[in-house]
Amino acid sequence: ISIQQGLRAGMEHDQFFLHYQPKFDCSGASIVGAEALLRWRHPELGLISPAEFIPVAEKSGQILALGQWVLEQVCREMRAWQDAGRSVAPIAVNLSQIQLRSPGLVEDILATKRRHGIAPDLLMFEITESAAMENADETRKTVDRLKAAGFALAIDDFGTGYSSLSHLQEFGVQQMKVDRAFIRTLAEENPQARSIVTAIIRLAHALEMEVVAEGVETPEQLRLLQELQCDQTQGYLLGRPMSGDDFSRLLNPDV
Ligand code: G
Ligand code: G
Ligand code: MN
Ligand code: NA
């Protein structure tokens, strides 16, 4: 109850903000985009993790308002960066399965990006494997409409849920994000972990998807991912979640 009431007050009193975690190409040399990550600074409880409050917001239905705020804020910040003459990179927004099932989702997304004058290729959407598979027929309809509008999509946390390979093929999304559980154990002396990541990367490539490794924390993991032809990486080694201003400066070191 208290988190649920707190969420309402938090939205009224601007207690939410976004962090951006950069995504790099696999050489680690260039930033190819970022993921927007929701943060809540509660006046008494301090910083509360989305892992704690998103499930509550999903149960109460508040995730719809919160998700709309995230999208609005991403578009607002990107517009400000562009107006300041900075270059921008595509930002990925996480969609909850409640949002995916909400009939107005695609219209809301289109209206929001139009209001802020954001090109569709500057936004992408991440859907967890479990959300996508749980309601595959509905997911597919929403995915098709988002793709038709020019947005890229990613399957998030891949490997932790159970995927139907035929659904995965039908969705035809651009990216697969390998869950960090598989990257955590990736090391020279762990051939089994390496085999699993190899198999996931081959599967993604066979489906013509780009592969993003999540949770890359060591140079060894990065080197192994390069050997395995992974396309992009995200993780504390190269970039932690940071403020929009810091992300924009990282992208524009000379501006
Ligand atoms: O950023 P962090 O690792 O604390 O995120 C924890 C979880 O919360 C992750 O699973 C992440 O995908 C999820 N999350 C973060 N921001 C959002 C958001 O804006 N919307 C949704 N639905 N989930 C988010
Ligand atoms: O489920 P999703 O992939 O959206 O979750 C993203 C979450 O993972 C964010 O909350 C972010 O803080 C966290 N994260 C990002 N990079 C790393 C990393 O290298 N190690 C760990 N342990 N967590 C990470
Ligand atoms: Mn994600
Ligand atoms: Na993930």
Image: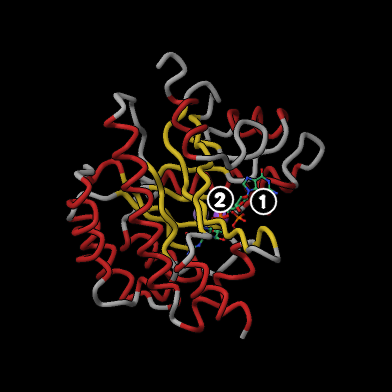
Q: Is mark 2 within 8 Å of ligand 4?
A: no
Q: Amino acid at mark 2?
A: Val
The image quarter containing residue 45 is bottom right
Name the residue: 64% across, 50% down.
180
Q: Do we see residue 189 in this rendering? A: yes
User: Would residue 126 appear left or right of 171 to someone viewing this image?
Assistant: right
Q: Position of residue 131 (x, y in %)?
A: 46, 71
- For residue 83, the mark is none
Label 2 sits on residue: 178
Is residue 242 shown above or below 15? above
Q: Position of residue 85 (x, y in %)?
A: 29, 24
Residue positioned most to the right: 189
Q: Position of residue 127 (x, y in %)?
A: 43, 61
User: Would residue 39 appear left or right of 11 to someone viewing this image?
Assistant: right
Residues at marks 2 and 1 touching, judged by CB atoms closer than 8 Å:
yes
Label 1 sits on residue: 182
Residue positioned most to the top: 254
The image quarter containing residue 72 is bottom left
Q: Secondary structure at mark 1?
A: helix
The image quarter containing residue 136 is bottom left
Which quarter shows the C terminus? top left
Q: Amino acid at mark 1?
A: Phe
